[in-house]
Amino acid sequence: MSLLTSVHAGTSQVDDFRVLLDEALHDFVRARQDLAPELTAELSRLILAGGKRIRPTFAWWGWRAAGGAPRADAVVRAMVALELLQCCALVHDDVMDRSTTRRGRPSVHESFAARHRRERWAASARQYGDSAAILVGDLALAWADDALVTAGLPADALSRAWQPWQAMRTEMIAGQHLDLLAVARREESLEHAVRVAALKTAAYTVERPLHLGAALAGADDDVVECLRAYGHDIGVAFQLRDDLIGVFGDSSVTGKPVGEDLREGKRTTLMAIGLSRAQGRTSAQRLLRRCLESGSISEQAVGEVSALLVELGAVTAVEEHIEALAGSGLAALKRAEIDDGARQELMRLAGRAVTRTT
């Protein structure tokens, strides 16, 4: 049994937490449904329609790992902030990437643009859709702060949580900008791709949520250091899995078109490894660069690039890197002086994060 399979096995309390979180999310949104109703309706549609709730879940088990109580309503309400932050990122990311779908439904900017066309409103439907979506993302970001501040946390706990919360918001935005720069500058280096993965995904998906939860519980520096080391490695592995899903994922499962990352020309770790391994093969390099720079490729080209990445060994290399990161992350977790039950849950969460198919 591989490391990833072994940590993925077994039953978990994670789903129990998700029930509590979903209740808190519904309560939070319901109390604000009359504010900016058209924007709120789209925000609610996205945030309540599903999602893996990964960030709040890691934050909760950071809380539990550092000795936090198994029943803490104010902490659950505070975790709503992380899902709202994710909502902001998704809406803005879809505008930047021109993604037409999200979770099997029209993306927010497409939904607004479709209404503009349907109602025959004035000016550009696309501009209206993009502009309204940006406001939805901004609203989600503002509400994220509201959720954290109004959760009912003790003043000292909120003060401890504020530093990782501030860092997480900034790192998320900085990582997104690095992603944009990669396209503008035609970045091809593996180092840059890994840096983007660390900031854009690892920090705000796993590392900082764990830090936030542990800070709420008053964890000492050694525990925070171990949890962040685990979170960094599992978070990068999460993004590498995402890179593979973005090329080879099943659209009926992901809710996205097959090969969407290739169509969008994303400069991922997978593509960086592919380009490196295509050195000396002019036709292979030409095909990969055309995929990155054209902005639109055919179904046939998607299939050709996918096959080429397998042939070059890039897919195998990414899988091996995921396995190595999972191992180093779990090693950091084992060093931490934390609650053993929470350690087991964090091991299972690592398995879910790096072996997922959506």
Image (cartoon, grey):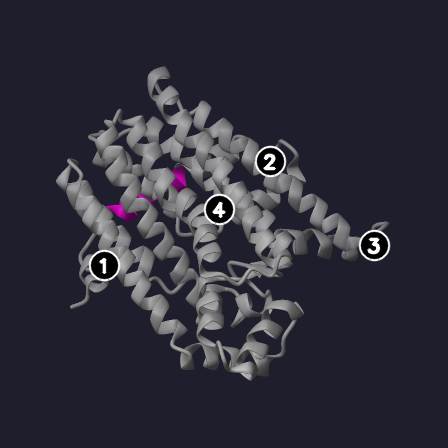
Q: Secondary structure at mark 2?
A: helix
Name the amino acid, label 2.
Leu
Residue most extreme to the right: 122
- The residue singled out by tag 4 in the image is 48
Q: Earlier in the sequence, mark 1 or mark 4?
A: 1
- In which quarter of the view is residue 213 placed? top left
* Amino acid type of the residue tagged 4 in the rendering: Leu
Q: Is 42 within the magenta?
A: no
Q: Which residue is mark 2?
A: 139
Q: Is residue 19 magenta?
A: yes
Q: Of label 4 and label 3, which has the lower sequence position? A: 4
User: Picture coordinates of residue 124 (x, y %)?
Assistant: 81, 53
Instruction: Work out how far the residue at label 4 is from the one at label 2, CA to CA, in angstroms.
Output: 15 Å
Frontmost residue, 59 versus 321: 321
Q: CA distance from mark 1 to mark 3?
A: 51 Å
Give the residues in magenta.
13-23
Q: Which quadrant: the N terminus?
A: bottom left
Using the image, tell me which numbered label, if any, was put on residue 298.
none
Compute the Cα span from label 3 to label 2.
26 Å
Percent across and percent down for residue 80 are 43, 36
Give the Cα distance between marks 4 and 3: 29 Å
Task: Check disc 1 and report the residue beneath it.
Answer: 8
Q: Identify the residue under disc 3.
A: 120
- Identify the residue at image location x=42%, y=49%: 198
Between 34 and 299, the residue placed more toward the observer is 299
Camera-near label (4 vs 2) is: 2
Q: Callout 1: 10 Å neighbours few (<14), some, many (20+)?
A: many
On screen, 27 above or below 306?
above
Identify whether 80 is placed above or below 89: above
